[in-house]
Image: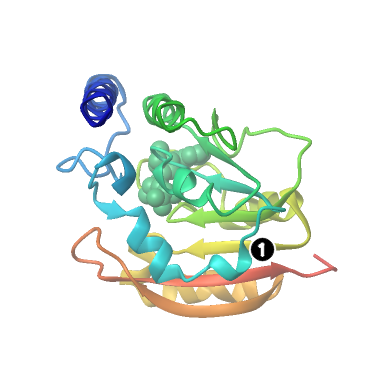
Amino acid sequence: MFMNCMEDLEQLHSKLREHLKEQNEKWEHFVYSKKDGFYQGLEEIKIRGSRSSEKRFEEYNIEKYLSKEKKALDIGSNCGFFSIFVSKFVGNILGVEINPYLIAIANDTKNYLGLENAKFTNSSFEEFKTDERFDLIFSLANDSTIDDNTKFNFSEYIQKILDLLNDGGIVIFESQAIDTMVSEKFEEKFRFLNGKFEVLEKRKIVSEYPVNVPYRDFVVLKKLDIA
Ligand SMILES: C[S@@+](CC[C@H](N)C(=O)[O-])C[C@H]1O[C@@H](n2cnc3c(N)ncnc32)[C@H](O)[C@@H]1O
């Protein structure tokens, strides 16, 4: 049994490496974690990545906002490992990701783990369309990306999040690396957010990647009724 699992895991790893190879060859926007291959890590499948999903979850300390009654959306879900980790704590989670090679990694992994409540859709956030509304939205290092794929300005990005949130819905927001390096950049965004949401938490969190950005800004926001 153990041998079978090991063999299956090896098969999964080889499939995932194949997706990374294709990404390398064909995705001109590939800028993250060139050395590690995977931006996110997931212990359950023994992939280390540049940023451990388990460590991030612990550092965010967000379990109190999650429950099996909640529907979640993860913007720019990358290889899906963080969404997959969070799927244990929510009713369901949908990841939206522009890079098709990362979507393939996410789908192979959730199939390997036999998860029914994590889904991934290959779309830009800008073009993503749904009739669903969410109780929780993850915006992790995603409000503007260094790969040249963000077309929304910050106000458009936040408006779309507000439109997708149920009343009283929660946003878990982590700053992109560059906004933390120049603190005024995040504070300007924060002033904008503060007018649209109730701020439940605001703090710095430890970040493993990139190494020159050991901390990022982190906020938990609740949609205001008037927003
Ligand atoms: C810095 S990574 C953050 C990944 C993930 N949110 C996390 O924190 O682990 C940015 C991700 O957003 C994706 N991305 C970039 N622009 C996007 C867009 N307009 N719509 C959806 N995904 C996008 C990239 O392909 C990449 O996976």
| 199 left or right of 9 in image | right
Return the residue found at the far left: 35
Q: Is residue 35 left or right of residue 140?
A: left
Mark 1 surroundings within 10 Å by alpha-carbon count, few (fewer than 14), some (14 through 19), many (20 or more): many
SS at circle 1:
strand
Question: Where residue 180 sits: x, y (%)?
Answer: 36, 70
Q: Is residue 42 visible?
A: no
- Please provide percent x and percent y for residue 110: 45, 32
> Which corner quadrant of the image does residue 176 belong to?
bottom left
The residue shown at (61%, 46%) is: 73
Give the quarter the ligand 1 occupies: top left
Residue 132 occupies which quadrant of the picture? top right
Q: Which quarter shows the N terminus?
A: top left
Q: Nearer the viewer, residue 168 or 123?
A: 168
Residue that badge 1 annotates: 170
Q: Give the x, y percent position of residue 169.
A: 72, 61
- Name the amino acid type tagged 1: Ile
In the rendered structure, the answer to whether residue 224 lies left or right of residue 5 reads: right
111 in relation to 220, above or below: above
Q: Which of the two residues, 74 or 52, is positioned nearer the viewer here?
A: 52
Q: Residue furthest right?
A: 226
Above or below, comparing residue 24 to residue 48 in the picture? above
Q: Residue at x 53, y 55 (%)?
A: 139
